[in-house]
Amino acid sequence: MSTSGQELLESFDHLPEAEKREVASAIIRRTFALERREVDEEQLATLYAEFAENDRRLAEEGIQDYERSLVGEDAQ
């Protein structure tokens, strides 16, 4: 991944949840090129659920990494 791509992801991580959902919604709409006026709410709900699960998993991994770094610092 390019540096700018990594910076973008890091910036995204700092957004509040509501803004993350807005960004995800915009990406979904553009990715699937939804030209109709109606949005499939069930499909969006599924995608949001996947997004939330991935976000939760990444947060847990981050907490585990942080905890390991603290234990390492304490050991020094």
Image (cartoon, grey):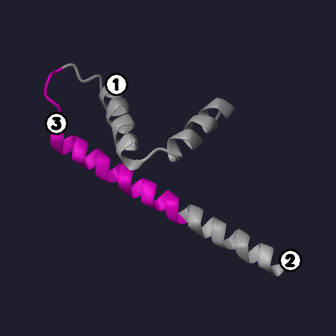
Taking the magenta stretch, the answer to whether it contains residue 56 is: yes
The front one of 46 and 73 is 73
Q: Amino acid at mark 2?
A: Gln
Q: Which mark is residue 76?
A: 2
Q: Position of residue 10 (x, y in %)?
A: 58, 43
Answer above or below: position of 39 versus 37.
below
Residue highlighted by disc 3: 40
Distance from the alpha carbon under mark 1 to that under mark 3: 14 Å
Name the residue rendered at 24%, 24% in the picture. Answer: 34
Q: Say which quadrant the N terminus sits in.
A: top right
Name the residue rendered at 34%, 42% in the picture. Answer: 21
Q: Check whether the beta carbons of the residues at disc 1 and disc 3 lie within 8 A of each other.
A: no
Q: Amino acid at mark 1?
A: Arg
Residue 43 figure quarter: top left
Q: Say which quadrant the C terminus sits in.
A: bottom right
Element type at mark 1: helix
Q: Amino acid at mark 3?
A: Asp
Q: Position of residue 60 (x, y in %)?
A: 51, 65
Answer above or below: position of 6 versus 61.
above
Which residue is the extreme one toward the right?
A: 76
Name the residue rendered at 57%, 66% in the picture. Answer: 63
Answer above or below: position of 59 versus 21.
below
| Residue range corresponding to the magenta coloring | 36-60
Residue highlighted by disc 1: 30
